[in-house]
Image (tube, rainbow, N blue to C red):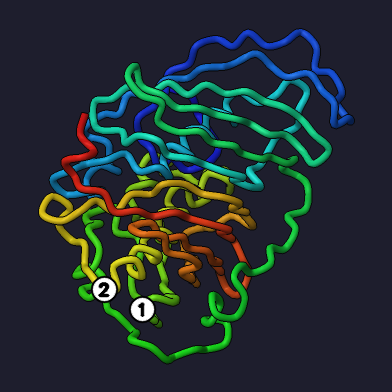
Amino acid sequence: MTSHSECRSVRTPFTERPAAWANSYGGYGSVSIDSFDDTTVTLRLDPDELVFHGHYRGFPIFAGVFLVETAHRAALAHPPIAAPRLRLARLESARFLHPSYPGDTLSFTLRWKRDARGWVCRATAATDEHQVARIRLRYEAADAPVAPLPAVGGPAADASAAGDTAGLGPLSLPDVMARIPHRDQLLLIDRVDTFHPGERVTAVKAVTFGEPWYRWLADEPADPGAYSYPIGLLMESFNQAAAVLATAERANTDVLADEVLMLGGYTDLAFGAPVLPGDLLEHSVRLSRTVEDVQIFEGTTRVRGEVVLTVGAAVLARRPAGALVG
């Protein structure tokens, strides 16, 4: 098992095929550089994996956020030669092309490049039958100062900062559960404070050390980085706030009887300071565009007033469950 300093949200370890790195890491301070040869890691999706328990009942799918996280952890395990210790700064883009299910084996192929702004890892995920995802991650030196992140979407998407109390909120946890299909250990919002159908939503999630994602930490205190909330869970919590907005006119609690709310892709996500147990995530999400059955959301997540995540675009689409099999 590859060990990482961060908390594992995906319990199943990936297995690794030795990399054939390029002999030269050219252009270290230049935009024009050499690239590394491909590195491939594989991940078998264990049907007992925790993230399948509540995503979704009766129709488990490996969420796109965990494809991103697996690619990220593989990138940390196989950093560029001569690079310092790295931190994830941005998810520049992700496209999710085909769903993944319990029992699938995914191969992640990684390719690094360096440019004037840092290190970029391009990852593709595939099964033997389908290409599953294309992901582009940007890294910077871990000891570099974390620049403050600006809010995304303007005042309408960031109404929580202004104390907005209009609209249909608050929604309690049972109200949330009556709208979206996430359950068990993967329901990652606790309440909705404001809810403007067709426009915006604000929601909160309390991060606690009692969550199952921290179960594999040693009983004794670990390195502080081990307690960082996994990026997959941070993104999924934001997505669930967006899903509440997406289901404003039509609830989506039973994906087999209705449709599956699928994550189609991301553009331009930025990550700030790490989230830790005891933090309260405050999501401000705005619906920026609707095209037929596809909705595009943007927004900001704060902890104690500090922006820890910005989302330029998250794409959600409804698909019939029957069309996703095979």
The count of marks equals 2
User: Circle 1 sits in a helix, a strand or a loop, which is it?
Assistant: loop
Residue 201 percent coordinates (x, y): 42, 75
Q: State the residue lying farthest toward the left.
A: 257
Q: Nearer the viewer, residue 86 or 296?
A: 296
Distance in Å between CA atoms under marks 1 and 2 = 8 Å
Res 141 quadrant in image? top right
> Would residue 195 appear left or right of 180 to someone viewing this image?
right
Three-letter residue code for mark 2: Glu
Q: Is residue 202 visible?
A: yes
The residue to which callout 2 is attached is 249
Three-letter residue code for mark 1: Pro
The residue depicted at 10 percent of the width and 54 percent of the height is 257
Res 51 quadrant in image? top left
Residue 59 percent coordinates (x, y): 17, 43
With respect to residue 77, does 269 lie above or below?
A: below
With respect to residue 283, does 132 lie above or below?
A: above
Determine crowd level at label 2: few under 14, some 14-19, many 20+ residues with C-alpha closer than 10 A.
few
The residue to which callout 1 is attached is 197
User: Circle 2 sits in a helix, a strand or a loop, which is it?
Assistant: loop
Q: Are marks 1 and 2 in contact (CB under 8 Å)?
A: yes
> Would residue 267 appear left or right of 102 to someone viewing this image?
right
The residue depicted at 88 percent of the width and 30 percent of the height is 30
Q: Earlier in the sequence, mark 1 or mark 2?
A: 1
